[in-house]
Image (spheres, rainbow, N blue to C red):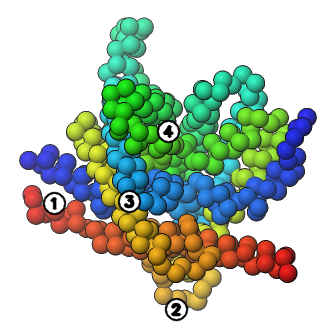
Amino acid sequence: MAGSGPTALERFINGIIPENPVYRQLLGMCPTLAVTNGMKPALTMAGATAFVLICANVITSLIRNALKPHLRILVFTLTIATFVTIADRFLQAFMPAMSKVLGPYVPLIIVNCIIIARCEVCASKQAVGTALADALGCAIGFALGLSSIATVREILGTGCWMGMRILPEGWDNWGIMVLPPGAFLTLGLLLGLAEWFGAARKKAGRS
Amino acid sequence: MDHLVDILLIAVGAAFINNFVLHYFVGICPFIGVSRRVDQAFGMGLAVTFVVTIASFLAWVFTWFVTRPGAPVTAWVWHLFSPGSDAVLDLSILNYIIYIFVIASSVQFVEMYLKKFFPALFKAFGVYLPLITTNCAILFACLEIMKHVSGVRNPAEMWGLDQALTLAVFGGLGFALAITTMAGIREELDLCDIPEPLKGPGITLLTAGIMAMAFMGFTGVDRGLAAFLR
């Protein structure tokens, strides 16, 4: 069925660590930086993105034979926009407070490069099962990326994790961590760390 | 007079205080990807300003006349089909789809127009124009306009076309400012001894963090300016 290229399982695993959307491919940076000042918004965002990613991938895969090459990007974005509208209305109806916190970043999922990239690279060429596995892997990888950044920022910025106190009461909150500059600094340092680990592992493998 | 002050505050807010890149994190992809050389970065900044203005204009027109609650065109069409009905129609559920459609097609048209009438400019922008379709900054400007047109209940507080265009133009210029500054810094960084793992995106993000701290210095400028002018 799949013919050439990685199988469904390989694609699923690929999305989580080896081709992690946040650390390896540097895709979808806007939400990565914007909603990671706490674990709860980060997880909600990851959930919404996962929903849109999975639905869009499955639909794209189902209609892949009818796609015209020059119109495909437009079709992708319209499919994605439809599911984002559903996700946005759902959040407004059932989690109004969280929807306020996330603000414009839920509709901005439409232009999240991860989803368009997955539709273009995988879903428009593969069968439904493979596309689904690929979307699941990518969604988990994205959730891991978001939560790692959110963990650092929330613990250093407020001393809590998911609202539970982690650091002692006397901890001086690093206010900058929950403000915009903290997002850039945390992601920059974590990227460096991931890069460093990768290089160290490669070196160990060679010698 | 108050109206002019409002517009000035929107302009300063969009360009400096709530800079698209450094405060709202939209348009990060080109900010990291196309900030290697100053001239390229400047070209990208201008291309974004250009497209964001056109897309915002169209987004405002559609939101104002078609999708906001009680919009004139929608009401008129509704009255054709059911005369005498006093229902207030709200099509704002279609907003996102309309915006992305408007952005994609305006990028397409801008590309064709430039190719025909300003070939030199088209050559300079060429590579970046298609990329702009998926630039969050454009959609973000449209969403801000939507928030101030269809999200407001009091008609007096609704943004007119002038306010919407101010946000778009100055937001775009703020983006150009941020990306050009970043490119200037990165050109200097080429000569520095950066730790191996941080090379590339890592050091760019750290630099952006420090720039964002500098831009935090603008916080409160709008209130001071308003008090001074009113």
Residue A66 falls in image quadrant: top right
Relative to A123, does residue A34 appear above or below in the rendering? below
User: How far apart are labels 2 and 1 at the CA level?
Assistant: 39 Å
Report if the CB atoms under discs 2 and 4 are less than 8 Å apart. Answer: no
Label 2 to label 4: alpha-carbon separation: 52 Å
In the image, is B178 to the left or to the right of A83? left
Left or right of B137 in this view: A52: right
Q: Amino acid at mark 4?
A: Pro
Q: Badges 2 and 1: C-beta atoms under 8 Å apart?
A: no
Counting from the top left corner in percent of width and height, residue A135 is at 74, 47
Circle 1 sits on which residue?
Answer: B226
Please report whichever mark, 1 or 4, sits nearer to the chain's N-terminal start. 4
Q: Residue A17: which quarter of the image?
A: bottom right
Q: Residue at x 66, y 23 (%)?
A: A68
Task: Respond whether the residues carrying marks 3 and 1 are from the same subunit.
Answer: yes
Disc number placed over residue B130 in the picture, else none: 4
For the residue pair B6 and A137, the one nearer the viewer reads as A137
Pick whichever, B68 or B213, lies toward us: B213
Q: Amino acid at mark 2?
A: Gly
Amino acid, disc 1: Ala
Q: Mark 3 or 4, which is nearer the eye? A: 3
Which chain letter matches label 1? Answer: B
Query: How far is the residue under mark 3 from the one under mark 4?
Result: 20 Å
Percent coordinates x, y for residue A159 in the rendering: 56, 81
Rounded to the nearest angstrom, the CA distance separating label 1 from label 4 is 39 Å
